[in-house]
């Protein structure tokens, strides 16, 4: 199972919105609505931001939103804040009953 | 509160095995799957597999199919991940996590496994 494809890096200024894409195949993202997104700060465990494409766990800011179209999912962060600077990972359930992560995207807040 | 506490750092020689534990508290252990994810230094997250804490059944990523075993002891609400035939490429932080609809909602603190001769 190949990793999902994410851009290596994205950047934005405080207050702006950015979108991170995550491209898979018909065997993963295209097959199910089980796409999740995680935020990871250096030296910390990841934190779940989005599950089932667009659902937010309790306590996660509504500045984070998810979307999916075909084999590609995306995470949008609106009203960018300095604390959003982190690594972001997507993941999807697959047709072989496994999970696959994206390579990760480093977000820089300018 | 829901919590996963993992065992401490390990140092192993190439060819050895390692067994990492993940003790759950604050919820019914057998009600949720447990995932295992690893992260090599400076690298991204890599899903290794998951285990049904109720039945003991497991599904592994193809890459680890012949080297990993995920088990649990429901009497002490603890999951285990054993990785055999270690190489330096297995040096990583290993995380356990509790499932929520095919996502990982709660993460352990991570266990650093270092493989070096």
Image: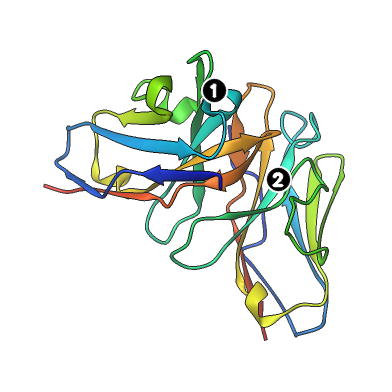
Q: Which one is nearer the viewer's eye here, B61 or B74?
A: B74
Identify the residue position indicated by label 2 in the image.
Answer: A36
Q: Which one is nearer the viewer's eye here, A74 or B104?
A: B104
To the question of a shared chain for discs 2 and 1, the answer is no
Q: Which one is nearer the viewer's eye here, A48 or B65?
A: A48
The residue drawn where x is 48% and y is 68% is A42
The residue drawn where x is 52% and y is 34% is B35
Above or below residue A65? Residue B22 is above
Above or below residue B53? Residue A32 is below
Kindly identify which numbered label has been placed on residue B30: 1
Above or below residue A46? Residue B101 is above
The residue drawn where x is 50% and y is 30% is B49
Helix, strand or loop at label 1? It is: helix
Res. B71 visible in picture? no
Above or below residue A109? Residue A50 is above
Q: Which one is nearer the viewer's eye here, A82 or A100?
A: A82
Q: Position of residue A50 (x, y in %)?
A: 74, 50
Pointer 1 chain? B
Left-right relation of A81 to B70: right
Q: Position of residue B91 (x, y in %)?
A: 30, 48
The outermost residue toward the right is: A69
Q: Position of residue B56 (x, y in %)?
A: 48, 15
The residue drawn where x is 72% and y is 32% is A28
Helix, strand or loop at label 2? It is: strand
Mark 2 vs 1: CB contact within 8 A: no
**Residue B102: quarter of image:** top right
Res. B90 visible in picture? yes
């Amino acid at each position: 199972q190949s990793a999902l494809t994410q851009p290596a890096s994205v950047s934005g200024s405080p207050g702006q919105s950015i979108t991170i894409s995550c491209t898979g195949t018909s065997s993963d993202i295209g097959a199910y609505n089980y796409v999740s997104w995680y935020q990871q700060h250096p030296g910390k465990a990841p934190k779940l931001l989005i599950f089932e494409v667009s659902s937010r766990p309790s306590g996660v800011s509504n500045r984070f939103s998810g979307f999916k179209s075909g084999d590609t999912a995306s995470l949008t962060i609106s009203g960018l804040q300095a604390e959003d600077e982190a690594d972001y990972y997507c993941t999807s359930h697959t047709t072989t009953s496994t999970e696959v992560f994206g390579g990760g995207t480093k977000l820089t807040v300018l | 509160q829901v919590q996963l506490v993992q065992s401490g750092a390990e140092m192993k020689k190439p060819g050895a095995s390692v067994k990492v534990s993940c003790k759950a508290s604050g919820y019914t252990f057998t009600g949720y799957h447990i995932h295992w994810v690893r992260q090599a230094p400076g690298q991204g997250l890599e899903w290794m597999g998951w285990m049904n804490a109720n039945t003991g059944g497991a599904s592994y990523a193809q890459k680890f199919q012949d080297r990993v075993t995920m088990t649990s002891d429901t009497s002490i609400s603890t999951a285990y991940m054993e990785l055999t035939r270690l190489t330096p490429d297995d040096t990583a932080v290993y995380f356990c996590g509790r499932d929520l609809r095919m996502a990982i909602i709660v993460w352990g603190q991570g266990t650093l496994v270092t493989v070096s001769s």
